[in-house]
Structures are given as structure tokens and as C-alpha cells.
Image (cartoon, helix red, strand yellow):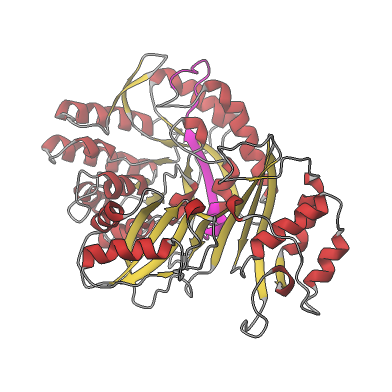
Amino acid sequence: MRIKAVVEYDGSNFVGYQIQNEGRTIQAEIQKAIEKITRVPTPIVASGRTDALVHAKGQVFHFETTMDLTFAQWKKAINSYLPEDIHILSCEEVPSDFHARYSAIAKHYEYILSLDEYSPIERKYVYQLCRYLNVNSMQKAAKLFVGEHDFRNFCANDEEETKSFVRTITFFEIHSVEKRIHFNLIGNGFLRYEVRMIIGTLIALALGQINEQYILDKLSGKSKDPVPYRAPGEGLYLVDVTYPTTQKDLANYHTHTYRCGHAIGRDEEYVISAINAGYKVLGFSDHMMVPGIDDDIWTRGKGSELPGYLASIESLKKKYAGIIEIHTGLEAEYFPELEEWERSLLKSGQLEYLIFANHYRSFDGHAFAGYYGAGNTSDEDVRKYQEMSVRALKTGLFSYFAHPDLFMAGKLEWTKACEECAYAICHTAKELDIPLEINQGGIRYTIEEGPFDYHERFKYPYFKFWEIVKEVGNKVVIGVDIHDPKEFGHVASKLSYEFADKMELKVMSRVPFKKIR
């Protein structure tokens, strides 16, 4: 079989990704680890090479093997033999015609530069220029690189050995956070040193050493005369690699942000990753931020952050109009004392939609308690879950029900109470025309954390629940339930669609939002 793996590494102590005559390399370390498992030499093929000191958050490689292990077993086994500066994020079986390099359709790089005072702690992870730059001039000039160009003057590739220097950059965004500048580039492929030479050239522009006409002349490709500017390797990160998907009209309405306290990444990073992964629709639905509650941040976001959340998503809608469709929502609990507040958010137009999620058994007006996804869920708990779920759906506030089978994450056996709960939820949702969500988060947690073997069951979606969904004839949506921009490329995405196919469920590509008058 052919295995695709996603790997993260700290490139500080490597002479590059590819095996070389001298020096430590990422490829050599991974191949040694796999050989210890398979007992035979096992070469790996990567999406591309990274240079000395360059890091990766989502490098991809593939290898061939006759050893039959689950995805979780491959990940755990390889990681057990890897050094601490390399870590496998995921493994999955792919078709024999998949190729880590030649099947890739896009790569996303990020470069981080600091204008702040020199820091010895950060010296391996950020280019510390430590001087003022005109960011506006770089943002304006970055647009010159977008599109198809001949990049022969922005690379170190040999003219005689390179068939074509033409590459396409589809996205180039520069933003500053305090005294750090982040450069994000997405393209169909990059030549050797191309990203670093583009960044170096923009730095020269911001320092007043060159002008935009210089860049245009170098992009003309009329002659081979490489720019003399190259940013250092330590600020560069390969963020992720995109491959063709068999799914069309990809949409995700279940997206979290750092505000919930257990997600990471800027709001815009989710947008960039969604675009890179081929999504046409992205709905932000972070955990509800209840006014007056600012200290229950693990289970829900701070109430004081709601205005900033709404403003941020609104600005992203405008910025990415015509590129990706963005919507504003919240993933919300239902308790009677919250109903009027939730209704007001929809009625006022502050939110476009609410996703219902039944996570907690109780709410005292200050904090939520009794997580249903934890172990030792009793039949009485299931009956309470059923009662609150049906009550919530009947309010008419919610456009769909997220992970409706979450109660099975904490229950080892399917009981009569579970069956009654499933039928009650499915019949109510069918009557009210509310879709039920196959949740990729439960699949990710099963693969990464256990305790179940995903071949036998996921934490959720739970097979018997979805057999009832099929019987009743409910509408179905797939939600990424994303808490990290990298999760758009997780193997859970593939498994969620396979699950829907196996259960013979038709997945909706668009979700109509409930209208509240």
C-alpha cells in the first residue's frame, strides 16, 4: 500500500530536508525511523525540499509498504523512533497513483520577520531584521507577484536543467502584528529560494534600495539576472500542501477561533487555509461568548470578545469577497435563560446563523458544567441530553445540530436509552427540517487520542445513531469543527465522506439559515 504522511519539523539543526553527503537531514531521520518498523529500506518521497534552517508545519511525503497498520499505529510507531524536532501529524492510505510531489496543486509558505529588539531565544525561528520597514510599500508591491510569471530572476535554479521558470502565485498577503511582519504566499509550486528571494526583494524595496519598476523588470523574464536579495532561512515555514479533492462545492460552517480558549491561529489563517484546501464557503461559528461571562474561557469564549469577533469576520467577508463566501455564526448551547439573547443576535442581524451543540448538562448563569463527551455517561444523562436537544430544536433558532451523537463519546455501550434518544432527535429534526452534522472533530480525536480503534468505532459519529438517521431520512451536513488551520487537510476529512458513503447518506453542500422575525 501507499501511505501519505504529514510531518512537522524544526529545521534549525538540519542542513535541509533532502539527504546529503554530510550533515543531518529530515529525510534521513524519517527513513531511519520507518526502516526500524518495516525492517527493510523504505525511501520516502516529499512534496518538495526545504533548505537548511527552514521549518515545516505541514510537509507531506509518501512511501510504499506491505505492512498493514492502522493510521494511528503508523503515526505512533514512526514518532516513537523520531528525534524530538520531527513529528508526524497524520498518516493515511492513498491510491497508488498519488504522488506527494507531482499530485500537489498548491503550497502555502509563511515567512516571519521581526522589527523588534534582537532576541536570542527567537533567533532560529524569526528573521530578526530589527529595524523599521515601510509595510505599506511591501503590501502594495506584493500584488506584482500575484498571477503567472517567469520567476527565473527570483530563484537559484540552473537555467539549463530547469524546463520552465513559469509559476503561479494565487495568494500573497502581508500583515503586521505589533512588531512582527507575516508574509503568506500560496502558489502552484515554488523554485529553489523563490520565496526567500521574493521576501528579500520586498525588504529591499521597503528600505528604499529599489523601486517597483525594478521588480517589474525582473519579472519580465527577458534575461537571466537574479536579484541579489535573499531573506535568511530561519524565518520560513512550509505551512501546508494541497492536493485535489474528489469533493465538489466544499463548505464548512463549523469554524472556531482562538477566542474559545482551545483553538489556535488568527481568523485570517482559517480563511487562507480554507481557500488553499478548495473550500467555497466558510462559516465562522466559534463557541458562544455570553455577555458578562469572562472567566469560563475553557468551555466558552469571553463575553467581552464578541464585538471583536463580529467585526473581524465582517472585515474578512469584505476582503475576500469574490474569492470565498464567508458567514458569521456561533456554536451555541441551549438553556432557557439564554434563548432571548440568542434570538436577539439573529433578529438584529449580528449573526447569520446558530449551530446547536449540546455539550453540557447544566448552566448556572455563570459557567457550564457536566460535559457529555466525558466518560461514564449514564442512561439518565442520555435522557437529559434527549430532552434538552428536542427542546432546543423546537425553538427554531438553530440552522443545524452539531455532533448530535456526542453523548456516545462518553458511553461504551448502545442502550435502549441511546436508541430512544436517537429516534427522538432524528424525528424532531426531520419534522423541523434541521440537518444533522457528521462531525470531523470526533474522527480526529479518535485517530489522535483513542481510546477506540477507528476501524471499530469513532468517538462520534457513532454508527448505530447514523443508521437511524438513514432510516428516518434526515438531511445531513459535514462539519470540520476546526480548531487549527491545518485541520482542513486532516485525514478525518476523507474519512467523514467515506463514512457518509458507507451509511448511504446524502451530504448537503449548502446549509440554509433559519430566518428569525
Q: How many marks?
A: 0
The picture places residue 400, in percent across and down from the top left corner, at 41, 42
Kindly tell me whether residue 505 is visible in this rendering: no
The N terminus - image quarter: bottom left
Q: Quadrant of residue 419?
A: top left
Residue 114: which quarter of the image?
A: top right
* Quarter location, residue 185: bottom right
Residue 28 appears at what percent x and percent y?
38, 65
Q: Kindly tell me whether residue 334 is visible in this rendering.
A: yes
Q: Is residue 75 magenta?
A: no
Q: Is 194 left or right of 45, judged from the image as shown?
A: right
For the residue pair 342 and 185, the one nearer the viewer reads as 185
Magenta-colored stretch includes residue 281: yes
Stretch of the chain drawn in magenta:
273-296
Front residue of 444 and 499: 444
Residue sitting at x 48%, y 43%: 255
Quadrant of the drawing holding the C terminus: top right
Tell me: residue 405, above or below residue 66. above
The correct choice, above or below, for 79 with respect to 4 in the image is above
- Where is 359 relative to 189, above or below? above
